[in-house]
Image (cartoon, rainbow, N blue to C red):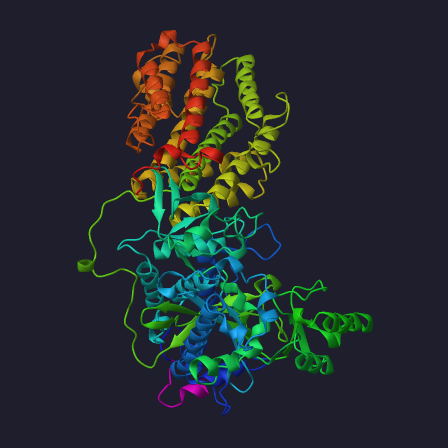
């Protein structure tokens, strides 16, 4: 069967039941060392959903399987799907398992009923904790169990969120036990992560196994995100609200997910510095002034949201945010302080709270938990210390122990075990005991065979006007060790897509609404000042890299005629080398071998001006723009970094790498020119490129078109500015000083001349909104107009070395003025002169 191609049903399906074919395939073809729990039902036969899956999967040959898995890995790499493990500074490629977790329709309905009930219960508990406070007053929850959590925020007490909803997005980590029942392992109420990665997992696997995915009738996740987005939109107090996703920034472990969700949902990705309080509202600092923000989906922990009322050391939040929330000036999802429900200390009280609020038992239990803040529970834990896991009551770590997870007393040395007992006796409120559970296992493809691995499933629920909507699927994490008791991405686990398989065909759903329900709009959109700043510098970094690569190519590929004198050739070579040293691309002396210089200028990680360093700087800047860059644009940047980081064997390899990278830079410029919407974001990317190209071209002209320059130097300049063909078509003589200067600096029709760049800068600046109300021409435009006038009225014969130096300084001043005007920082960031007539 393994040799058959395609994704259809296996041959002979009429003579042998599907579950028997699948079982034989898993035994004979992949030689299972152990059958995954998820594959086998309680009666010992394969679950129907897995039988259907493997019946089709068995028709794929081993090469076809590897090809499809390779395609999935390439998509992850090209799309730059990454995460950062706790404590690490470098991103890792997203570790997606190639096989999905399958859940049958009936099984899923039981799971979602329990999740919806639990979300409703926690919403009611949260309303009471920050509202009337009856649960603590009447003894239903001990006060210490709440007050011990750093996530219980007293400034939030008495603040009722708009429409009374505290939890907008809830997630529960669940696992299946040996008896087939689902158990809750933990609640996520702070700012649940994983939904964006679940979306990316689905995109990858549905492409890798398109026919199989369709034939399995997998429930779509788009309706869930649509319901969640509509719920947030409906929570605002105007019809077309502006919604932002608040991220800690690019150093967040899950920044890629933040960008993915913002792009998919159509939200603005903002950081704390992008926001400002004015009156009773939150506003975004944009290149057009302050713009009102109505809803904030936060991915920043509550304590860091407002340095005025919460953690004063925070640089991630917005000063004054809590006061705006108190005045109902903004909707924050989830409500600050909701993270208190993640405390394990509360787990033991939820069964009684469920009966109190809902009049019924929990439909899906959690693992047995004893909070040591109560004497009876503490004594129970101490009496069974070797049989249970000890965890922190209010955090992942156990107080006094270095491990970032549970402590197993039975595995501790005697002295450490006694220290743990003493700590529990002395301050029991900081500890909980939890029953050790064995997680169910799912199939994982490992080196050409299927092996069982434990998994944890995170299920998401969104609050909507019609109740809680559950994402059909979720975020699955798989442990690398068969006996893993805790699953964490930082511990080397991988993720899996989750397929909820229906018995009937699934209708296609999308986030695109019906045409007749949408009002047509042609607006430029809002560009936060930080995003505009990053776009501007992305353009500058890429243009700097191009200029450096052109120098490397010119130095590595001699441009002189063989008949020229050697002294003249060496003179030009030394000037190229001197420019590379000045730009920080190399530290080698100008008398060093050109081969050594070009190699260092191309690939040195230590030199800030090398091509590799500049492209990496561009990639770092582009990371902050993930929600604004297309996958193709990101792929081009990634490929440039990978190419320049590869080891080059010889001189020809250096020149070849430089030339190929120049082609990729041209590809990026083409993508930006042809695919980016002509809004403010595109203009700032273009302005960065134009400003940097003008500066670099003047520097080339100063170095190779100086007053006494010979034809060798002028020929180098024509090569660097890519004007050899144009010059030869205009002039039937060798390179002369005045014509070369005119072509490189003054010609408004040459797309690489300084005059062309300044003209483009003038057009972009004129198209941007005015930031001041006096009606006068603003400084960036004033400088650009003056530069354009100077270039338009200057004659080539009068373009001396001193004039070129003044022109370079004027261009640097213009670039700095653009940054100060449109990307304000510090005390000027709020633009007080624009506070009237806010949008």
Residue 675, quarter of picture? top left
Side of 772 relative to 403 (left or right): left
Whether residue 60 is visible here, answered yes or no, is no
Residue beneath the point at 42% across and 26% down: 817
Looking at the image, which residue sits at the far right?
A: 415
* Whole-percent x, y for residue 168 in the image: 41, 65
Magenta region includes residue 170: no
Residue beneath the point at 51% across and 90% down: 44
Magenta range: 10-21
Residue beneath the point at 71% across and 82% down: 384
Q: Quadrant of the N terminus?
A: bottom left
Q: Which is more toward the observer, 32 or 611?
A: 611
Residue 344, quarter of picture? bottom right
* Whole-percent x, y for residue 727 in the image: 34, 19
**Residue 302, placed above or below residue 356:** above
Residue beneath the point at 38% across and 19% down: 744
Q: Quadrant of the C terminus?
A: top left
Looking at the image, which residue sits at the far bottom?
A: 43
Q: Which is more toward the observer, 450 or 622?
A: 622
* Whole-percent x, y for residue 382 in the image: 73, 79
Q: Which is more toward the observer, 236 or 132?
A: 132
**Residue 827, placed above or below residue 762:** below
Side of 379 relative to 217 (left or right): right
Side of 323 relative to 772 (left or right): right
Magenta residues: mostly which secondary structure? loop
Whether residue 589 is visible here, answered yes or no, is yes
* Whole-percent x, y for residue 773 in the image: 30, 29
Q: Which is more toward the observer, 104 or 29?
A: 104
């Amino acid at each position: 069967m393994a040799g058959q191609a395609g994704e259809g049903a296996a041959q002979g399906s009429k003579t042998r039941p599907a579950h028997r074919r699948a079982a034989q395939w898993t035994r004979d073809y992949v030689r299972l060392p152990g059958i995954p729990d998820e594959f086998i039902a309680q009666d010992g036969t394969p679950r129907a959903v897995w039988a259907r899956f493997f019946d089709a999967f068995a028709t794929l040959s081993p090469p076809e399987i590897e090809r499809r898995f390779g395609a999935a890995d390439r998509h992850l790499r090209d799309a730059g799907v990454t995460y950062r493990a706790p404590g690490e500074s470098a991103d890792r490629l997203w570790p997606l398992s190639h096989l999905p977790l399958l859940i049958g329709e009936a099984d899923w309905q039981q799971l979602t009923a329990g999740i919806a009930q639990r979300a409703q219960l926690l919403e009611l508990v949260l309303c009471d904790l920050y509202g009337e406070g009856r649960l603590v007053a009447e003894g239903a929850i001990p006060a210490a169990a709440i007050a011990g959590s750093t996530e219980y925020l007293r400034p939030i007490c008495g603040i009722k969120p708009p429409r009374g909803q505290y939890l907008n997005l809830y997630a529960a980590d669940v696992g299946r036990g040996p008896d087939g029942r689902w158990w809750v392992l933990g609640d996520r109420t702070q700012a649940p992560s994983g939904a964006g990665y679940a979306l990316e997992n689905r995109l990858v696997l549905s492409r890798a196994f398109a026919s199989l995915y369709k034939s399995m009738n997998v429930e779509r996740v788009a309706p869930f995100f649509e319901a969640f987005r509509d719920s947030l939109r409906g929570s605002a107090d105007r019809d077309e609200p502006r919604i932002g996703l608040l991220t800690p920034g690019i150093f967040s472990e899950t920044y890629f997910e933040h960008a993915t969700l913002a792009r998919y949902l159509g939200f603005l990705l903002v950081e704390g510095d992008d926001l400002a309080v004015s009156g009773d509202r939150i506003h975004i600092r944009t290149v057009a002034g302050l713009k009102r923000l109505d809803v904030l989906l936060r991915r920043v922990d509550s304590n860091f949201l407002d340095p005025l009322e919460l953690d004063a050391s925070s640089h991630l939040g917005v000063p004054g945010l809590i006061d705006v929330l108190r005045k109902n000036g903004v909707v924050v999802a989830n409500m600050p302080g909701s993270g208190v429900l993640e405390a394990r200390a509360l787990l033991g009280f939820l069964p009684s709270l469920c009966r109190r609020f809902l009049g019924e038992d929990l439909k899906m239990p959690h693992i047995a938990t004893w909070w040591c803040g109560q004497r009876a529970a503490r004594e129970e834990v101490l009496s069974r210390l070797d049989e249970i896991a000890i965890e922190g009551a209010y955090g992942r770590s156990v107080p006094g122990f270095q491990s970032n997870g549970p402590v197993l007393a039975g595995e501790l040395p005697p002295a450490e075990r006694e220290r743990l007992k003493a700590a529990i006796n002395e301050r029991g409120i900081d500890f909980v005991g939890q029953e050790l559970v064995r997680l169910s296992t799912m199939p994982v493809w490992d080196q050409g065979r299927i092996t069982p691995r434990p998994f944890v499933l995170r299920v998401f629920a969104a609050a909507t006007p019609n109740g809680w909507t559950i994402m059909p699927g979720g975020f699955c994490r798989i442990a690398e060790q068969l006996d893993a008791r805790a699953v964490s991405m930082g511990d080397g686990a991988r993720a899996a897509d989750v397929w909820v398989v229906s018995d009937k065909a699934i209708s296609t759903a999308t986030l695109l609404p019906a045409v007749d329900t949408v009002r047509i709009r042609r607006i430029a959109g809002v560009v936060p000042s930080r995003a505009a700043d990053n776009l501007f510098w992305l353009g500058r970094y890429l243009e700097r890299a191009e200029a450096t690569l052109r120098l490397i190519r010119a130095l590595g590929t001699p441009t002189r005629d063989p008949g020229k004198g050697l002294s003249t050739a060496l003179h030009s070579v030394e000037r190229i080398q001197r420019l590379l040293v000045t730009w920080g691309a190399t530290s080698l002396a100008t008398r060093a071998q050109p081969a050594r210089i070009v190699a260092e200028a191309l690939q040195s990680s230590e030199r800030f001006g090398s091509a590799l360093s500049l492209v990496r700087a561009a990639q770092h800047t582009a990371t902050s723009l993930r929600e604004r860059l297309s996958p193709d644009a990101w792929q081009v940047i990634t490929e440039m970094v990978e190419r320049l980081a590869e080891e080059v064997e010889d001189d020809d390899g250096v020149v070849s790498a430089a030339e190929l990278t120049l082609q990729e830079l041209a590809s990026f410029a083409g993508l930006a020119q042809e695919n980016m919407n002509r809004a403010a974001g595109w203009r700032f990317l273009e302005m960065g490129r134009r400003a940097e190209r003008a500066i670099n071209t003047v520097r080339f002209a100063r170095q190779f078109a100086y007053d006494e320059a010979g034809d060798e130097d002028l020929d180098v300049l024509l090569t660097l500015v890519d004007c050899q063909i144009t010059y030869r078509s205009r002039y039937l003589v060798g390179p002369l000083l005045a014509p070369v200067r005119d072509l490189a600096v003054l010609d408004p029709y040459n797309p690489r001349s300084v005059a062309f760049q300044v003209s483009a800068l003038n057009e972009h600046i004129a198209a941007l909104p005015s930031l001041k109300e006096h009606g006068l021409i603003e400084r960036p435009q004033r400088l650009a107009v003056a530069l354009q006038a100077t270039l338009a009225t200057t004659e080539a014969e009068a373009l001396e070395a001193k004039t070129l130096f003044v022109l370079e300084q004027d261009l640097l001043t213009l670039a700095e003025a653009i940054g100060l005007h449109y990307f304000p920082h510090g005390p000027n960031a709020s633009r007080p002169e624009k506070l009237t007539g806010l949008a």
